[in-house]
Image (cartoon, rainbow, N blue to C red):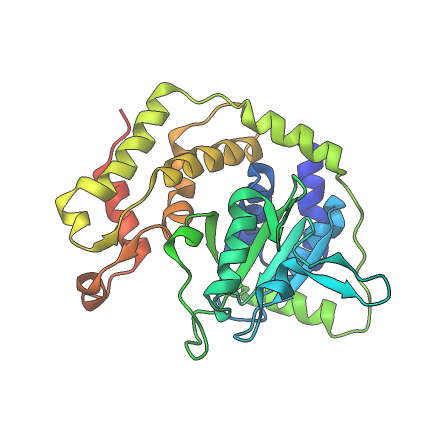
Amino acid sequence: MERINRVINEISKKVIGQDKLIRDLLICLLSKWHILLEWAPWLAKTLSVATLSEVTSLNFNRIQFTPDLLPSDLVGNRIYHPDTKEFSTKKGPIFSNLVLADEINRAPSKVQSALLEAMAEKQVTIWDETFKLDKHFMVLATQNPLEQDGTYSLPEAQLDRFLLKSIIDYPSEVEEIEIMKKYSIDQVVKVNKILKKTDLDILQNEISNIHIDENIYIYVKNLIFCSRNDKEIKEYLLYWASPRASIALIKVAKANAFLEWRDFVIPEDIKTMFKWVLRHRIILNYESIADWLTPDMIIDKILDKVEIK
């Protein structure tokens, strides 16, 4: 746990005022799952991911998603060599540990399909060959909700593959001043490598062994079933939370307990992370939009309705 605190401190040298973002990134990394980051540009999303790769010794690639992006730009392609009359495989930028899919909702469905295979199966198909990705492969996707021109809605199946949807907030007044002081001068901020891949394997194994009482499983089941069966909640939803939401909530609760220096999960772990796990997994219908409701408002209603027994 001491190493995790050192990781957080190192990232904070470069990333100011985004403590929640740093924590969300670590939760997903330790849970071996993907994360969706949302809000306006210039809020250190890319900087946070790049710094995370520096501190954890993981490879990092950034892919700018655009409407004209092709699947081969993502996964790679087969190249013909006229001199030898043979083909060779050129692997794309997705063959990395941390892959930043910048403005993911700007790419068309063919690209999303190729990315979904990598996210779901941790493998990539190039022509008739299938390649396994590194076990530490993780997609960190960003999207800007303020722009609608030239964007595509992500498929529900792909949204379900993200462990968390983290909404990035603006820095405070004090943090804004600190950012200006640090980045208004030409000075390179260096960070130290804290974790190796073997260290990460050990931490991930420790989290998987964190204890969860049977009552916690029942509580999670009741929360998810409330989104499907409660009459008041159902009338506002087009799609309800899938079983993958239940699995994600358990994984996130374990990681949150670990970051709180506990080897067991308590209901507060579920309540703390429930909104981050569910907000991209429930799809609102026209009635909810007409009533000016948001996914977070619906989630708050679910939390109010379900009690831990």
Q: Residue at x 81, y 57 (%)?
A: 190
- Judge by depth and name the residue closer to the eye, 218 or 126: 126
The quadrant of the picture occupied by the C terminus is top left
84, above or below 222, in the image: below
Q: Is residue 16 something that shows in the picture?
A: no
Image location (x, y in percent) of residue 234: 18, 49
Please give left or right for residue 255 compared with residue 148 in the image.
right
Q: Residue furthest bottom?
A: 149
Q: Residue at x 50, y 60 (%)?
A: 112
Q: Is residue 236 something that shows in the picture?
A: yes
Q: Residue at x 29, y 38 (%)?
A: 224
Image location (x, y in percent) of residue 191: 79, 52
- Judge by depth and name the residue closer to the eye, 266 or 90: 90
Q: Residue furthest right?
A: 83
- Judge by depth and name the residue closer to the eye, 147 or 70: 70
Image location (x, y in percent) of residue 200: 69, 35
Q: Could you tell me how many numbered marks the image carries? A: 0
